[in-house]
Amino acid sequence: MHKSIDTFQISLRHNFPVMFTKRLFDITFSLLGFLFLWPILLMIGLLIKIRMPGSVFFTQYRIGRNAQPFKMVKFRSMQAVHNGTSVTVKGESMITPLGAILRKYKLDELPELWNVLKGDMSIVGPRPDVPGYADKLIGNDRLVLSIRPGITCLASLKYSNEEELLALQKDPYNYNEEVIFPDKVRINIHYIQNRTFGLDLKIILYTLFGLKFEETHLN
């Protein structure tokens, strides 16, 4: 049985050492990321500027901890003008050839280290949704909003091929609404109620090495 929202939020406040350790790790990890990855960040930025007319970065308001909006920054992977949908399918024309490569290897998400450093996000945590999807969270599902969202999480590992999966569906948007989104919420709630520093490290390693998520990780 899930903990109630009020009970869980109280337990978070009383678990200060864990929260402090996680935040310290996030700051250290993001600083080291910028220190070692700046040549890659610079190269990607130059490639985008040369091959994709428009801005280098894509910013969008997402919903963070305690349902507070923040501006998330990514490398731009789509055409400068597109339909604005939050559900993307592999092969869509709005995704540029360079953008497709960036998305495949998750390189478009590297600038989110800035959001981690600022405190908007964490390295590990539920992926932040746009306001419309966050509004769909009701009852205990709103536990997803009780912690900082992250760059990677168990749900992201399971759906690392999300765009390819959606491309196979007759109605990808309906499939996302009825299957993928509810399953991500389920996985994220499990993570929140069972997270440890060791689990965070495991998720980071699985992300870096592209290892496959197994449902047994939820046991």
Image (spheres, helix red, strand yellow):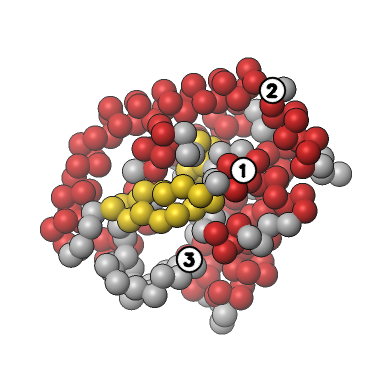
Look at label 3 and name its amino acid.
Ser
Which residue corresponds to the image point at 69% horizontal and 22% vertical from the top-left?
15
Residue carrying label 1: 66
Residue carrying label 2: 15
Look at label 1 and name its amino acid.
Asn
Label 3: how many Cα within 10 Å (few below 14, some 14–19, many 20+):
few
Is residue 126 visible in the rendered image? The answer is: no
Residue 161 is left or right of residue 182, and the answer is left
| Marks 2, 1: nearer the viewer | 1
Q: Where is residue 174 drawn, in percent x and y?
A: 61, 75
Q: What kind of element bears circle 1?
A: helix
Is residue 146 visible in the rendered image? The answer is: yes
- For marks 2 and 1, give the CA distance: 17 Å
- The C terminus, quarter of image: top right
Residue carrying label 3: 86
Looking at marks 1 and 3 on the same chain, the residue that comes earlier in the sequence is marked by 1
In the rendered image, which quarter is residue 101 located in? bottom left
Q: What kind of element bears circle 2?
A: loop
Look at label 2 and name its amino acid.
Asn
Task: State how many labels appear.
Answer: 3
Q: Where is residue 131 drawn, in percent x and y?
A: 55, 59
